[in-house]
Image (cartoon, rainbow, N blue to C red):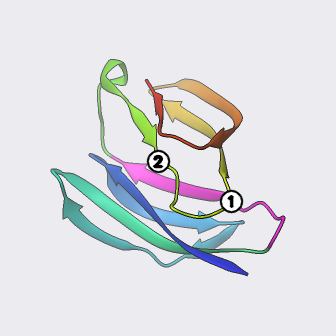
Amino acid sequence: VNRLGLDLYTPLDAVDVVIDGERAGFGFAPAHGLNRINTVVDVDAGQTVVVEYLLSGRIDPDDYELTVVPNATAATDTFAGSFDIDGRRLVIQPRPVSEPIRIG
């Protein structure tokens, strides 16, 4: 099992974090002018884990930006995402994260 710390920095408030359909514990603290939501994720070798964040608040959809930063590990992470932003759905197909990915 690989255990990793996953951080999300957002101007929104955290309501819940769900990992593979189960509610997960998470930490919440201000950082760099944003809210830092952190949780621990266990990933078995060769497996995929789905992490869902339930957030509350409002931001201008035109100002939304997401940056995915790779973990400092030997293996390359893969990122895929689905976002509901003001009634619009943005889907990011799976892609390797070998360098930061900027979306928005």
Q: Nearer the viewer, residue 29 or 2?
A: 2
87 magenta-colored = no
Q: Which residue is mark 2?
A: 69
Label 1: few (<14), some or many (≥20) within 10 Å? few
Residue at 43%, 23% (x, y): give it: 104
The label shown at residue 29 is: none
Residue at 41%, 68% (x, y): give it: 38
Identified by mark 2, the residue type is: Val
Determine whether, in the image, residue 71 is placed left or right of residue 48.
left
Residue at 65%, 29% (x, y): give it: 91
**Residue 24 pos. (x, y %):** 55, 75
Determine whether, in the image, residue 5 is placed left or right of residue 36.
right
Residue at the extreme right: 46
The label shown at residue 75 is: 1
Of the two numbered discs 2 and 1 in the rendering, the one whose residue sits closer to the viewer: 1
Residue at 77%, 60% (x, y): give it: 48
- Which residues, given as a range, are shown in magenta? 45-56
Residue at the extreme top: 62
**Residue 81 drawn above or below residue 36:** above
Q: Secondary structure at mark 2?
A: loop
Total marks placed: 2
Whole-angstrom CA distance, mark 2 to mark 1, is 14 Å
Q: Quadrant of the N terminus?
A: bottom right
Determine whether, in the image, residue 91 is placed left or right of residue 85.
right
Label 2: few (<14), some or many (≥20) within 10 Å? some
